[in-house]
Amino acid sequence: MGKETILIIDDDRDLAKIVQLSLDREGYQTVIANSGLEGLQEAYRVQPDLVILDIMMPGMDGWEVCRRLGEMSNVPILMLTAKGTETDVVKGLQIGADDYLTKPFSVAELIARIQALLRRAGSQAQTDKPSILSIGNLTIDLNRRMVMRDGELVDLTPTEFKLLECFVTHRNRVLPHRFLLTEVWGPEYIDETSYLKLYVRYLRRKLEEDPANPQLIVTEWGVGYRFCVT
């Protein structure tokens, strides 16, 4: 079985080459595109297993490329950003990115992120976004909007379930506060982090073995939360 193919879309030719050499040493197959349009053409041609996508490019920027990639495939997308603000992260996740990395970055962290994305992509390809998810003693049925813990029905309010559904749908991803607030409560609540913290506390009490030491809904300090499924 051959190694995965990674498409690097970045107008910074020197950086793209450094990334390519680093990934080649890890045994990956790599392809470089130096513009958004060329990136889309290469994505169609090689059908990569993962895309590393710069945001700030002349002409077609990374936002538009990400949106178009999402229309043609489910390929995991790791976005590179020079700013890394929460607003940028939220925008990237909303249009289909799977993870982000702020420039400048270490090669070791880049490779670790790539490996994690590829593992999750492989797992999700096997399950194809199931409506029923089993995690330890929990069973989450998205279609029937039911949660069972140790065989007992967990009583969740509509808002609690909506937040849990958002976590499950985007499991193993870092979800910024504003993304969660927009998805669950709406854009008018984008700054109401107290709402989010309160409902995360409710979910932890009902779902976690030890709410004081959560293993499912993990805090990503200063950014948001991650729903961890192994």
Image (tube, rainbow, N blue to C red):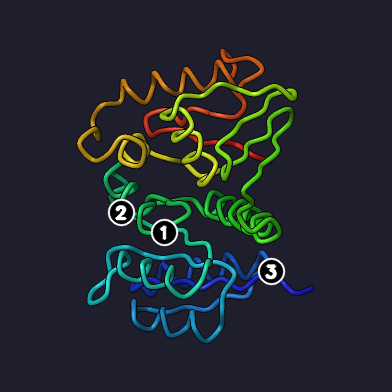
Measured from the top left, where is residue 4 in percent x and y?
66, 70
Specify which label sits upstream in the sequence, 1 or 2: 2
Residues 129 and 13: in front is 129
For badge 3, the amino acid type reads Gly
Measured from the top left, where is residue 53 in percent x and y?
41, 65
Label ID, residue 227: none
Q: Secondary structure at mark 2?
A: loop
Task: Categorize mark 2 by other alpha carbons within 10 Å: few (<14), some (14-19), many (20+).
Answer: some
Q: Secondary structure at mark 1?
A: loop
Quadrant (top left/top right/bottom left/bottom right) for the N terminus: bottom right
For badge 1, the amino acid type reads Gly
Which quadrant holds residue 210?
top right
In the image, residue 155 above or below residue 33: above
Q: Secondary structure at mark 3?
A: loop
Question: Disc 1 marks which residue?
Answer: 96
Question: Disc 3 marks which residue?
Answer: 27
Does residue 226 appear to the left or right of 151 in the view shown?
left
Label ID, residue 82: 2
Measured from the top left, where is residue 208 in percent x and y?
62, 21
Residues 205 and 141: in front is 141
Residues 123 and 223: in front is 123
Label 1 and label 2: CA atoms lie apart by 19 Å
